[in-house]
Amino acid sequence: MLSWEQARRLVQMMDELVENLALTTMCAEEIRAMAYAKLHGNQPGGNQPGEGLFEGLFSLDQRPRVDHTTLSVVWAGKRCYLGHTILFKLADRLSRRPNHFATEADLLRDVWDGDEKTTSTIRSTIHHLRVRLQEAGMDDLAAAIQCEDGRYALLLG
């Protein structure tokens, strides 16, 4: 039988594994898209001598870290405690796939576990997350949360 501490550590390790798998998937998708663009000449200035395949891939340290053990977001040396809240789940969802837009249906499924919510609930929650990040001195991260045609993304350099 597992002790409480062993169970807590196991959950922590699983959360870290999920985060690492998400990062690996994100990197693979970025590399695939860049390689495809390079092969088909769709990259601006593509096929120039000396141009590296990975040029333009955003730095992995630009991605905020969602710390499941402290229920907080870590960005640029700052920490924003969100607790076990819908704001934490939203920050986690957006940071897993930066620079990719999620539909409201995606967010309802992944953040609200499929509960019926209105568009205004999603907008309000996004607003509250931005405010909490700003209060923690993460103005640039808060500003990176963008909405376009009812789709939301964390747009990083």
Image: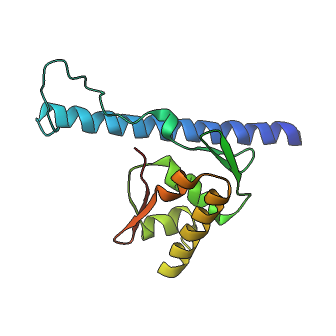
Q: How many marks?
A: 0
| Image coords of residue 21 (percent x, y) | 51, 37
User: Is residue 136 found left or right of 51 in the rendered image?
Assistant: right
Task: Give the vertical position of 76 relative to 133 (above or below).
Answer: above
State the residue at coordinates (52%, 73%).
Answer: 122
For the N terminus, which image quadrant? Answer: top right
For the rendered model, the colour scheme is rainbow
User: Is residue 41 found left or right of 105 in the rendered image?
Assistant: left
State the residue at coordinates (54%, 67%).
Answer: 126
Residue at the outermost top position: 50
Task: Give the vertical position of 89 relative to 44 (above or below).
Answer: below
Q: Which is nearer the eye, 40 or 25?
A: 40
Q: Which is nearer the eye, 124 or 85?
A: 124
| Image coords of residue 111 (percent x, y) | 56, 63
Quadrant assignment, res 36: top left
Task: Give the vertical position of 34 relative to 93 (above or below).
Answer: above
Quadrant assignment, res 105: bottom left
State the residue at coordinates (38%, 58%).
Answer: 101
| Image coords of residue 76 (percent x, y) | 59, 40
User: Is residue 120 found left or right of 55 in the rendered image?
Assistant: right
Quadrant assignment, res 17: top right
